[in-house]
């Protein structure tokens, strides 16, 4: 059985057509309910990698950002924006400002999929761009070149958080064993991020999961052999999701 072999490899990837109201709203051209763009702020942006967007989601745990649906327009956030992983999945609209290398009138929307770590052996104003308290986006080259020319190296940007437009519903990646469940939450629309998670086995009540890292949440509970339910509450889309109880998984975690 397909489910059996997936369980055997300790990984289950499940797609769900939930968030139907978000998807309907976005396809009609409206921002998802419950999340509004933030005000504009200032930051700087650099780029890494080649035009492929580099693929790997790094510190958030998305794995390959192309196969998990995030595409080329991604960025690593400085510590201040990364917020210990709670910034993962958030979407930001950026515009290059005040540099001769800016592409006039161009905007790009990126998803946060990685951490740009501090490098204290570099001055925060000369190479250590991601050092706290700097607000910095280290973007995929593909994303950067939509708002500025590469020669710039680094450009001032203005940015704001915007709703994430996702299709295909929430996506979960399960790891763990019968006593420990680790869930990666992906493809979150609206706010894009996840603030809290619960899981419920057919023989348990709702169990609050703790934040492991990036977009991974964990429960230390005996859930093996049970069907699982889960609910998640991305920040700022809480209202929309509070009445969503997702039937998640009918296979067995062994
Ligand atoms: C930090 O900066 C130093 C000096 O430029 C460099 O040699 C080193 O490779 C950097 N470390 C990382 C992890 O990028």
Image (tube, helix red, strand yellow):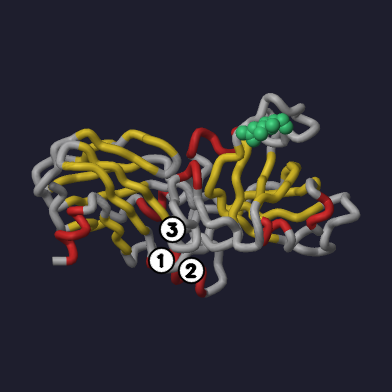
Residue 85 x, y percent position in the rendering: 49, 38
Mark found first going from the N terminus, 1 or 3:
1
Q: What residue appears at the point 64 percent right and 59 percent down from the top-left corner? A: 109
C-alpha gap between disc 1 and disc 3: 15 Å
Q: Which residue is mark 2?
A: 25
Q: Is residue 91 left or right of residue 104?
A: left
Tell me: residue 135, above or below residue 58: above
Q: Are marks 1 and 3 in contact (CB under 8 Å)?
A: no
Q: Secondary structure at mark 2?
A: helix
**Which quarter of the rendered image does ligand 1 occupy?**
top right
Q: Secondary structure at mark 3?
A: loop
* Residue 230 in sight here: yes
- Quadrant occupied by the N terminus: bottom left
Residue 94 x, y percent position in the rendering: 70, 54
Ligand 1 is within 8 Å of the C-beta of the residue at disc 2: no
Q: Which residue is mark 3?
A: 187
Residue at the bottom extreme of this rendering: 28
Tell me: residue 105, above or below residue 111: below
Q: What residue appears at the point 81 percent right and 64 percent down from the top-left corner? A: 105
Q: Are marks 2 and 1 in contact (CB under 8 Å)?
A: yes
Residue 21: give its label: 1
Q: Secondary structure at mark 1?
A: helix
How many neighbours does mark 3 have within 10 angstroms: few (below 14), some (14-19), or many (20 or more)? many
Residue 89: give its label: none
How many neighbours does mark 1 have within 10 angstroms: few (below 14), some (14-19), or many (20 or more)? few
Q: What residue appears at the point 26 percent right and 49 percent down from the top-left corner? A: 230
Q: Nearer the viewer, mark 2 or mark 3?
A: 3
């Amino acid at each position: 059985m397909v489910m059996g072999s997936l369980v055997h490899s300790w990984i289950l990837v499940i797609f769900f057509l939930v968030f139907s109201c978000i998807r309907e709203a976005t396809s009609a051209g409206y921002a998802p309910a419950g999340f509004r763009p933030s005000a504009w702020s200032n930051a700087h942006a650099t780029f890494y990698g080649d035009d492929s967007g580099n693929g790997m989601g790094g510190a958030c745990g998305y794995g390959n950002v192309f196969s998990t649906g995030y595409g080329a327009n991604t960025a690593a956030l400085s510590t201040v924006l990364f917020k210990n992983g709670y910034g993962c999945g958030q979407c930001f609209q950026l515009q290059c400002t005040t540099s001769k290398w800016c592409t006039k009138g161009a905007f790009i929307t990126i998803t946060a999929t990685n951490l740009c770590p501090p490098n204290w052996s570099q001055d925060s104003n000369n190479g250590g761009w991601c050092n706290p308290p700097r607000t910095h986006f280290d973007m995929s080259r593909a994303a950067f070149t939509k708002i500025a020319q590469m020669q710039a190296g680094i450009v001032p940007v203005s940015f704001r958080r915007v709703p994430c437009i996702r299709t295909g519903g929430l996506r979960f990646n399960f790891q763990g064993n019968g006593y420990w469940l680790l869930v990666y939450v992906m493809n979150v629309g609206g706010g894009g991020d996840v603030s809290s998670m619960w899981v419920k086995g057919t023989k348990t009540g709702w169990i609050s999961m703790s934040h492991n890292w990036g977009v991974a949440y964990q429960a230390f509970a005996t859930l093996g052999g049970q069907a699982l339910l889960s609910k998640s509450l991305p920040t700022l889309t809480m209202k929309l999701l509070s009445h969503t109880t997702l039937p998640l998984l009918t296979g067995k975690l062994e």
